[in-house]
Image (spheres, grey):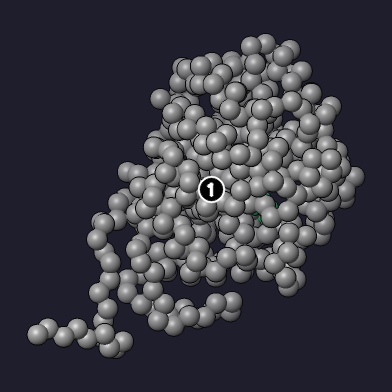
C-alpha cells in the first residue's frame, strides 16, 4: 500500500502546469502600434467629467460590458479603471459610485477577447500576497492580458477610511517600492521563500499558480513628482502624465525614458490621458466641450484640486486656472474637434513622445461608435495605427 507523506519538511510539489507565455504574445500593451489607445475611468460615476452635461453613461454592469466590448472590437489596447473609495462631493459626488477594480477587471477579462484589462490598486490598502494572487487569477482568466496600475493613495479622506494616518508623499513611494518588490517575488520566485522588509515580513511564502504572461503582468504608474518618476523609471512599463503644453510633454517624456535607460537599464513608455470630444464639425465639438464646463461641478473640482495641492509647493490660486481642465477630463489633455483635428492632435502627442492615450468621453458608449467609424480609419491613414 502506498503511503503519502505530508511532512512539512518535504519539498512540496508545485503547480507549473501551464507554461508561462512571453507577454509580447498575449498582452496588446506590448504590440507595435505607434499610438496605443485605451479608455480611462469607465468604472466610476461621471467618468472623467465633473459635470452634469447630458450623457447615457452610467455605472451599471451591463453598460460597463458594452463599453469594454466596443473598445475590444475596435482593437484598443487598454481599459484602465480609477480606484476610488469615496466621492469628491460637490453636486455630483464625483466618482462616488465606483466599481472595485480587481473584481471589475476579472469580469471584463471574461467578457472580452484581446484588450488589456487593468486593475488600479492603492498599494497601502491591499497586501502583496492577496494582490499577487488576484492579479494572477485575472491574468489566467484573460489569457495574459492583465495589467496593474500602481497608485500610492493621495486622497487623504479615502485613505483615512482604512484607518491609520497617511504617509508623507515620498514615504508612500518607499512603501510602494517594497510592495512591488514583494509582489514581483510572488509572481516569479519558484517554491517557497522568505521576505523581510520594513513594511512586510513573511516566511515560507509561496504563490501558485504564476501569472500566465511572463515575466509578469504589465505595470503602470502615474507618478509625476521626483519620487514618482523615480518609482516609475525603476519599476513599471508605462508612465502616465498630462502636461499643459506639448513642449513640456516633450521634455518630460525624453527625461523619463532617459532616466529608466541610464539609471535602471530598462525601457519605459510614456503615455497620456484626456477627454476626447470628436464631432462632425469643430463648432459642435467645441459646443459639447463647453457644455461640460458650463454644467460643471465646480464644488467637486475645487475639492479635487485642494486635495491634490495640499502639501504641494504651488499655490491654490495657480491651480484654479486648471479647474476647467479638471472639470472636463480630470486634468488630462483635451482633444476637441473634427475627426481630422482629433487625429492631428493625437499625432502631436505622439511626436511629443507619448506612445498612447487613454481617453475619457462624455458618453463612452455612443461616442465609441463614432470613434470607430470616423477616427480609426484616419489614425491608420496617418500612420499612427495599422
Ligand atoms: C492616468 C492616471 C491614473 C490615475 N489613477 C489613479 C487612481 O485610480 N486612484 C488614485 O488615487 N490616484 C490615481 N492617479 C494619481 C497618481 O497615482 C499620482 O498620485 C498622481 O499622478 C501624482 O503624482 P505623484 O504621486 O508623483 O505626486 C492617477 C493619475 C493618472 C495620471
Above or below: residue 45 compared with residue 132: above
Q: Position of residue 182 (x, y in %)?
A: 48, 70
Above or below: residue 224 compared with residue 188: above
Question: Looking at this rendering, what residue extends furthest in the front direction?
Answer: 1
Residue at (60% x, 63% y) in the render:
123
Residue at (39% x, 73% y) in the render:
206
- The front one of 211 and 45 is 45
- The front one of 332 and 354 is 332
Question: Looking at this rendering, what residue extends furthest in the left direction?
Answer: 1
Q: Label 1: how many residues lie within 10 Å, few (<14), some (14-19) or many (20+)?
A: many
- 187 relative to 237 in the view: left or right: left
Query: Count the marks: how many?
Result: 1
Give the image quarter of residue 137. bottom left
Q: Position of residue 251 (x, y in %)?
A: 63, 42
Q: Position of residue 274 (x, y in %)?
A: 65, 34
Residue at (62% x, 59% y) in the render:
122
Residue at (48% x, 46% y) in the render:
107
Q: Secondary structure at mark 1?
A: helix
Does the beta carbon of the residue at mark 1 sit less than 8 Å from ligand 1? no
Residue 230 shows up from this direction: no
The quadrant the C terminus occupies is: top left
- The front one of 79 and 261 is 79
The quadrant the N terminus occupies is: bottom left
Per the image, the residue denoted by label 1 is: 104
Give the image quarter of residue 345. top right
- The front one of 157 and 23 is 157
Q: Position of residue 249 (x, y in %)?
A: 64, 39
Residue 368 shows up from this direction: yes
- 87 relative to 210 in the view: left or right: right
Amino acid at each position: 500500500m502506498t503511503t503519502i507523506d505530508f511532512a512539512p519538511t518535504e519539498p512540496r510539489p508545485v503547480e507549473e502546469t501551464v507554461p508561462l507565455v512571453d507577454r509580447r504574445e498575449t498582452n496588446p500593451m506590448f504590440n507595435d502600434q505607434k499610438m496605443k489607445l485605451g479608455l480611462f475611468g469607465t468604472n466610476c460615476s461621471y467618468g472623467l467629467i465633473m459635470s452634469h452635461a447630458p450623457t447615457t453613461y452610467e455605472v451599471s454592469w451591463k453598460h460597463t460590458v458594452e463599453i469594454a466590448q466596443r473598445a475590444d472590437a475596435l482593437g484598443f489596447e487598454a481599459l484602465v479603471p480609477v480606484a476610488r473609495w469615496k466621492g469628491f462631493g460637490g453636486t455630483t459626488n464625483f466618482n462616488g459610485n465606483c466599481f472595485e477594480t480587481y473584481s471589475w477587471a476579472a469580469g471584463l477579462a471574461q467578457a472580452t477577447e484581446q484588450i488589456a484589462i487593468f486593475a488600479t490598486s492603492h498599494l497601502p490598502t491591499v497586501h502583496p500576497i492577496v494582490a499577487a494572487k488576484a492579479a494572477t487569477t485575472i491574468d489566467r482568466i484573460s489569457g495574459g492580458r492583465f495589467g496593474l496600475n500602481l497608485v500610492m493613495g493621495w486622497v487623504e479622506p479615502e485613505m483615512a477610511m482604512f484607518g491609520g494616518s497617511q504617509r508623507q508623499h515620498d514615504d508612500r513611494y518607499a512603501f510602494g517600492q517594497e510592495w512591488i518588490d514583494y509582489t514581483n517575488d510572488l509572481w516569479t520566485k519558484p517554491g517557497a521563500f522568505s521576505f523581510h522588509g520594513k513594511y512586510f515580513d513573511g516566511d515560507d511564502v509561496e504563490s501558485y499558480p504564476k501569472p500566465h504572461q511572463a515575466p509578469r503582468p504589465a505595470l503602470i504608474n502615474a507618478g509625476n513628482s521626483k519620487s514618482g518618476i523615480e518609482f516609475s523609471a525603476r519599476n513599471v512599463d508605462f508612465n502616465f502624465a498630462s502636461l499643459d503644453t506639448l513642449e513640456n510633454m516633450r521634455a518630460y517624456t525624453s527625461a523619463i525614458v532617459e532616466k529608466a535607460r541610464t539609471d535602471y537599464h530598462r525601457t519605459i513608455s510614456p503615455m497620456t490621458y484626456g477627454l476626447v470630444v470628436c464631432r462632425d464639425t469643430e463648432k459642435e465639438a467645441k459646443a459639447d466641450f463647453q457644455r461640460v464646463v458650463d454644467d460643471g461641478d465646480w464644488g467637486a473640482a475645487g475639492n479635487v484640486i485642494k486635495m491634490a495641492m495640499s502639501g504641494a509647493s504651488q499655490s491654490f490660486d495657480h491651480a484654479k486656472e486648471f479647474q476647467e481642465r479638471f472639470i472636463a477630463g480630470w486634468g488630462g489633455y483635451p482633444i476637441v474637434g473634427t475627426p481630422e483635428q482629433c487625429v492631428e492632435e493625437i499625432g502631436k502627442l505622439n511626436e511629443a513622445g507619448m506612445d498612447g492615450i487613454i481617453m475619457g468621453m462624455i458618453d463612452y458608449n455612443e461616442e465609441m461608435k463614432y470613434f470607430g467609424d470616423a477616427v480609426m480609419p484616419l489614425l491608420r491613414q496617418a500612420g499612427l495605427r495599422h
